[in-house]
Amino acid sequence: MGPWEGTYPTDPRYDPELLREGDHRNVVDAYRYWKREAIVADIDTRRHPLHIAIENFENDANIGTVVRTANAFAVDTVHIVGRRRWNRRGAMVTDRYQHLMHHDTVEDLVEWTRGQELSLVAIDNIPGSVPLETATLPERCLLLFGQEGPGVTAEAQHAATMTLSIAQFGSTRSINAGVAAGIAMHAWIRQHADLSKAW
């Protein structure tokens, strides 16, 4: 969007610089020309009681994709377990609008989750897992994803109240972790979100 045409709005949520220079950010039209802080504050009134965690012990490149998708679904917080640093390119700058929290270990994440009275749900295609397609997800929950390759760690599986798998029908052993996270988040949205509030 180019510079604002006509009289500038007086609403304090608008950014004077963006009004002058134009708004080229990847935001929905309702947030055009708004200050970043104003956008975050507004999303905070719409966030769902859904949390996402991804293990990052080998610097997983999928984290950016997970953050971007979590932002699209107004997830409360994305939790990164393990390495603090991650490749933000895949997030497409959505990390500026998404709450992020770091935990050094799975144990730290589990303790935090219990303190928030969230159900910990692991997503992994392992023997004994329940198909996501048939499961009822808790409304207040944290969906935990392992990194590409090894999947959810044994420690995380043990702490989870349930482990869900995504139905597959082809030759590959697993789905990309970023894609799997998107599928699981959307499953939660279908069960719990008020679709009348979607853009």
Image: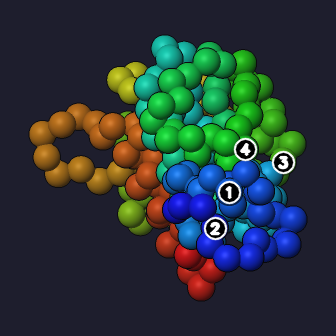
Nearer-N-terminus badge (3/1): 1
Q: Is residue 112 left or right of residue 173?
A: right
> Looking at the image, which residue sits at the far left?
171
- Residue at 33% over, 37% down: 176
- Give the answer, above or below, for where 84 lies relative to 46: above
Q: Which residue has dot 1 on it?
A: 20
Q: Is residue 143 left or right of residue 164?
A: right
Tag of residue 103: none
Q: Are marks 2 and 1 in contact (CB under 8 Å)?
A: yes
Q: Which residue has dot 4 on it?
A: 99
Nearer-N-terminus badge (4/2): 2
* Label 2 – label 1 distance at C-alpha: 6 Å
In this view, the mark in front (3 or 4): 4
Kind of residue indicated by mark 4: His
Q: Are marks 3 and 4 in contact (CB under 8 Å)?
A: no
Residue 135, position in %: x, y?
A: 48, 63
Kind of residue indicated by mark 3: Gln
- Residue at 58% over, 45% down: 94
Q: What color scheme is it?
A: rainbow
Tag of residue 116: 3
Mark 1 element type: helix
* Label 1 – label 4 distance at C-alpha: 29 Å
- Give the answer, above or below, for where 73 lies relative to 79: below
* Label 3 – label 1 distance at C-alpha: 43 Å
Q: Which residue has dot 2 on it?
A: 4
Crowding around mark 2 (Cα neighbors within 10 Å: few <14, some 14 to 19, many 20+) is some
In this view, the mark in front (3 or 2): 2
* Label 3 – label 4 distance at C-alpha: 16 Å
- Residue at 74% over, 34% down: 101
Q: Using the image as rendered, state which of residue 59 and residue 175 is in the foreground.
A: 59
